[in-house]
Amino acid sequence: MSTFQEMAEAVISGNAKKVKEYAKQALAEGVSPQAIINDGLIAGMNVVGVRFKNNEVYVPEVLISARAMHAGMDVVKPLLSEAEVQDKGTIVVGTVKGDLHDIGKNLVRMMLEGAGYKVIDLGVDIAPDKFAQAVEEHRPQIVGLSALLTTTMVQMKNTIERLKDYPVKVMVGGAPVTQKFADEVGADAYASDAATAVEKAEQLMAS
Amino acid sequence: MTLTSRERLILTLNHEEPDRVPLDLGATAQTGINASTLYQLRKALGLQSKPITVHEPAQILGVVDRDVMQALGVDVIGLWNPVNTVGVRNTDWKPWTMPDGTPTMMAGGMRLSVDDSGNTYLYPQGDASVSPSMKMPAEGYSFDNIDRGGDYDEDALNARRDFSEDFTVFDDDTARYLESESERLYETTSYGIVGNWAGGGFGDVFTLPAPWLTKVPHGIRKMEDWLTAHVLYQDYIRELFDMQSEIALKNLEIYRQAVGERIQVIWVSGTDFGTQNGPFFSPEIYRKLYKPFHKKLNDWIHKNTNWKIFYHSCGSVVSLLDDFVEAGVDILNPVQCSSAGMDPVMLKQKYGKTLVFWGGGVDTQRVLPFGTPEEVRAEVNQRLRIFAPGGGFVFNTIHNIVGGVPAENLTAMYDAVRENNA
C-alpha cells in the first residue's frame, strides 16, 4: 500500500495522477477520507509552503502542487458527509474594488486550502458591500483582502470600515502592502507572502 | 561647457559621469506618466491646460510635451512604433475623458465602451464587432487584459500554430515611418533617443493575451497557465520563443536599416521576472528557457549596432542579474529597490560598472504616492548619492508614475533632482 509519505511526496512534486491513484488506493484499503486529507494532501502542501517561503521552489511549482492536491481532494471530498467535513475554518478572500490582479490572491487561496481551510474566493474587483454580503452568507472567521495597485490600496481601508460590525478578522496582503499600512487601515494581520498568510491565519484563529 | 541631452545620455551609458544626471520622463512605456497625473503636473508647473494625448492606451500614458520636458530638464525622448498596444494607429486624435474627469486625446481608430457598472472596455484594432480585449474597472486609471481564450487543450498544444498571428515582420510603411520619425527626432532635437522596438519580450504576460488581435487567441495565454508551463511544457515555450526570435531578428535588421545610429538605446524586453519577494521562477529555468534567446538577440544588436540594450523587469531580480549581464543586457529598469534584496548600495557596488540603472530614483509603492514632499525629497537625494557617481544612471521613478500621485510630490522630486544637479 502507498503510505501517506508517498502521497505527500506526489503533492510536493505536483504529480496529480499519482495523487489521485494513491488517494483511491488508500480509500480502497479503508483509510478514512479525513486522514487522507490531513496526513497526505495537507502534509504535502505544508512542505511546499515552507519551501516556497525559503525560495527553494517558486510560483510554478506551487501552482502545480496545488493542482495535484485538488486532484486528491476531488477523489475524497465527495465521500465526506457534511458533518464529517472538518475544515479548520472558513476564509473569504478577494481582490479589492478597482483591482483586477489575482495571481497573489490565488496563491494565498491555494496555500490556505492546502492548510485545511475552506476558502471562498470572491474573485477580483470586489466592492466592500460584496465582501459584507459574503461574510453574512458564509460566516467566515477571516476575510483576506488583496491589492496590487497603489491606486486601489485605499479600498482595503473602505472594506475594513464596512466590515467593522461583523465578528470577523481581516488579513491584508499584496505587493505594495506593508505591516505599517496594515496597522494604519486597522487590519488584524498582514501577510507578506502566501506561506505567511497561512501562519497569520493560524494566529488569528487562535486569538 | 554644457553638454546636450544626447551627449549627457551617451556619457552615462558608457559609465562616465556627465555634467549632471540625465532625466527620463516618458521615453518608454515603463518610464512614463499616467495622463491624469500628467494633467495635474502641468497645472502644478504653471503650464497651459490642455487635454493629454494618450500614446499608450492600456496604461493610459500621456505624451510628455516639449514644454514639460523643458520645465523639468528631461533629456530622453522615445521613438514609438506607429501602432499602439491594442493594434490601432496612433493618429487622428479624438477627445476621451478619463473616469476621474481628465480630458485626453485618444487615437481616432480606438473604440471604447462603458457598461452599467462603469467598467470601460477597449476593442482590438478598434473593432467593436468582436469581444473587447482589455478592461478598466470603474474609477480606474489603467486597463488590464481580458481572458478571451479560456482554458487550453493540453492535447492540442502547438506553439507555432497557437501564436501564428501574434508576431509580424514590419511592413514597408512601418519601416518608412520609423526612418522619417527617427530622422525628425534626431535632427530637430538634441535629446537622447530610445527606440521602443519592443520585439524581444519573450513570455511577457502583458502581451501573451495579444490584446491587439481581433481573433480570439489560442494556446497558453493566462498568467497561471503560463507559469505552470515553465515546468510542464518547456518544449512549448521553447518553440514559441524560437518562432518569436526568428521574426525578431528580421525586425531588428529592418529597424537597423530604418533608424541607423540615430537611436542610442533600444528597448528590447518588458517581461517581468520578479515578484515582491523573489523571481517568478527559478534562476535555472531562466537560464534554460530565456537566456539563450535573450543572448541571441542581444548579440545581434551588439554586433551590428552601437545601441545600448534596455530590459525592464519589475520585482526582485537580484538572483538573475549575473545572467542578465552574461546575456548582454546593458540597461536595467525599473530597479525596484522596494523588493526583496534589491538594495541600491549593493546594486551600485556590484553591478554599477556593468549595468546602467535606469530608474530606482524613488519608491513608487509608498513614498511617491503616500509620502510627504519632504520624504520624497529625502529619498531622491539618497538615491542620487548612491547611483549617480561614475555615471551609469538615468533618473526615473520606479516604473510609470501612476494615477493618484500628488503633484506636489512630483515637483518635490524634480526640485531635488535639479538641486543635486546644480
Image (cartoon, grey):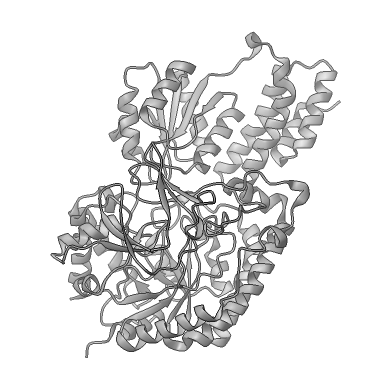
- Residue B196: x %, y % from top left: 45, 72
Placement of B208 over or under A4, stated as above or below: below
Residue that lies at the very extreme toward the top in this rendered image: A83
Placement of B401 over or under B2, stated as above or below: above
Q: Residue at x 73, y 16 (%)?
A: A79
**Is any atom of residue B16 visible in this view?**
yes
Q: Quadrant of the C terminus of chain A?
A: top left
Q: Residue at x 49, y 40 (%)?
A: A193
In the image, is B144 to the left or to the right of A24? left
Of the pair A153 and B357, the residue shown nearer to us: A153
- Residue B183: x %, y % from top left: 39, 87
Q: Residue at x 41, y 48 (%)?
A: B113
The quarter of the picture where residue B10 lies is bottom left
**Is any atom of residue B301 visible in this view?**
no
In the image, is B270 to the left or to the right of A176? right
- Residue B61: x %, y % from top left: 35, 61
